[in-house]
């Protein structure tokens, strides 16, 4: 059992793992909130609109794979991760403010869902590249 958690002996990995857990929880909360907002508040249970939102959230991840892989390989991954995490926070804040103020419209959610999908693809590629850097940290993969 000790070999399984060997990577948690490294302080930097523990910090990264805690941040990754928090980031993933926030990302899935935002995705779920977008779907729920479209389903209940903006369209009154229109499944097609929810399907479009889901497609906009996950579609960019397939289309942008070569570009995000290139960015993860050739740019400073730490700075790219910081920028993308900040971008995801700004997207969540802006959509939250639009929703709370009552100004959110369906097209707003479409745009935010697409942008979240784009930024999430960069995060995923940078994270996968970062986890494979030190050989001693390969056991979590």
Image (tube, rainbow, N blue to C red):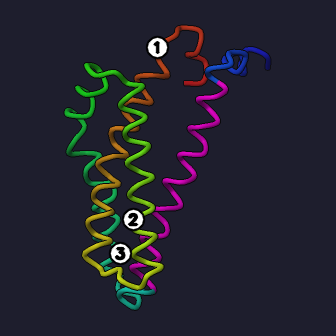
In the figure, residue 129 lies in which quadrant? top left
Nearer to us in this view, 71 or 69: 71
Sequence-first tag of 3 and 1: 3
Residue appearing at x 28%, y 22% in the figure: 75
Residue drawn at the location 55% of the way across and 16% of the way down = 138
**Left or right: where does residue 14 sit relative to residue 83?**
right
Whether pointer 2 and pointer 3 mark residues with C-beta atoms closer than 8 Å, the reply is: no
Q: Name the residue under label 2.
A: 94
Label 2 vs label 3, nearer the camera: 2
In the displayed structure image, the side of residue 18 where residue 62 appears, left or right: left
For the C terminus, the image quarter is top right
Counting from the top left corner in percent of width and height, residue 115 is at 29, 55
**Mark 2 Cα within 10 Å, few/some/many (few <14, many 20+)?**
some
Q: Position of residue 84 (x, y in %)?
A: 37, 41
Q: Distance between the residues labelled 2 and 3?
A: 20 Å
Say above or below: 110 vs 6. below
Instruction: Locate the N terminus by quadrant.
Output: top right
For residue 22, the mark is none
Q: Horizontal placement of 8 versus 64: left or right? A: right
Residue holding disc 3: 50
The 10 Å Cα crowd at callout 3, few under 14, some 14 to 19, many 20 or more, is many
Main SS, magenta region, reads helix
Where's residue 40, x and y in %? Answer: 45, 86
Residue linked to disc 1: 133
Over which residues does the magenta segment extend?
Answer: 14-40
Residue under the image location 44 percent in, 60 percent down: 92
């Amino acid at each position: 059992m000790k070999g399984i958690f060997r990577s948690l002996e490294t302080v930097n990995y523990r910090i990264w793992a805690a941040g990754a857990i928090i980031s993933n929880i926030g990302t899935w909360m935002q995705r779920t909130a977008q779907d729920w907002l479209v389903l209940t508040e903006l369209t009154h249970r229109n499944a097609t609109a929810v399907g479009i939102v889901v497609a906009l959230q996950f579609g960019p991840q397939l289309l942008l794979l070569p570009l995000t892989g290139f960015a993860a390989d050739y740019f400073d991954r730490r700075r790219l991760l910081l920028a993308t995490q900040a971008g995801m926070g700004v997207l969540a804040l802006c959509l939250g403010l639009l929703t709370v103020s009552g100004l959110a419209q369906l097209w707003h959610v479409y745009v935010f869902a697409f942008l979240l999908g784009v930024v999430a693809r960069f995060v995923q590629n940078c994270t996968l590249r970062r986890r494979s850097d030190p050989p001693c940290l390969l056991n979590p993969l």
